[in-house]
Amino acid sequence: MNNIWIAPASDDAATVNIPKSLSNEIPDGIKEKLQLLGISEHFAWGARRGGRDVNVGKFERMKPGDVCLFYTETLSEGQKKKAFNWVARITSTLHSLELASELWPFEKGEAFELIYFLSTPIGISLTIAQVSQLLSETGEKYAGAPTGLMSIASENLKIVEQRLGSTPLLRTLLKRGTMCQRSVHVQTQKIQP
């Protein structure tokens, strides 16, 4: 069974980056550079190295086909709401400070240099409680807002496999929550000097 990753993307820096490569395609100029590296994906997300490089080992365990649930912040009826709003499969990974700086420019803090490329992300709406019920036997694990990149424990993967059987994981995850397909588009503007 493929792994399941939980990616928190709800702080201010991540929220600004969502339309740059998760809810919209990577900009064309960056896609051209990726093609020179043999990468043809249109969507990506990144993680920071973290203190003592805590995320580097996690990143190195990401494999094509793994599922990633993104915990993000949205604005709904004038109020900020955090939930699992996106799901996608990981297609490849690349550790690149240079590319991360182009995709997600930053002024302070760490760059999102641990880049994972994604299948087309699908908009979902799952609460923390729904994800906890899906991923753990009694809903006790994963019951809080994610505070860092994490993979689901092997015993919880077994629970998911028992509950969902042989149905492809991505499709089944979407059935568990309210699916709200979001249109994917790229908005480009030329800025005149």
Image (tube, rainbow, N blue to C red):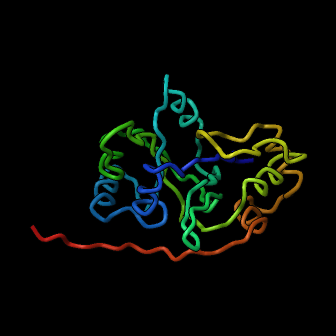
Q: In the rendered image of this protein, does residue 46 appear above or below residue 48? A: below
Horizontal side, residue 154 vs residue 112: left or right = right
Horizontal side, residue 85 vs residue 162: left or right = left
In the rendering, at what x and y percent does residue 114 appear?
45, 40
Residue drawn at the location 12% of the way across and 71% of the way down = 192
In the rendering, at what x and y percent does residue 157 appear?
79, 44
Q: In the rendered image of this protein, does residue 42 appear above or below residue 143? A: below
In the rendering, at what x and y percent does residue 186 appear?
38, 72
Residue drawn at the location 49% of the way across and 22% of the way down = 52
* Residue farthest along the front direction in this orientation: 78
**Where is residue 177, by image quadrant?**
bottom right
* Residue farthest along the left direction in this orientation: 193
In the rendering, at what x and y percent does residue 109 appear?
37, 37
Label tally: 0
Q: Nearer the viewer, residue 53 or 125?
A: 125
Residue drawn at the location 72% of the way across and 44% of the way down = 144
Horizontal side, residue 171 vs residue 97: left or right = right
Figure quadrant of the C terminus = bottom left
Residue drawn at the location 69% of the way across and 47% of the way down = 4
* Residue farthest along the top direction in this orientation: 52
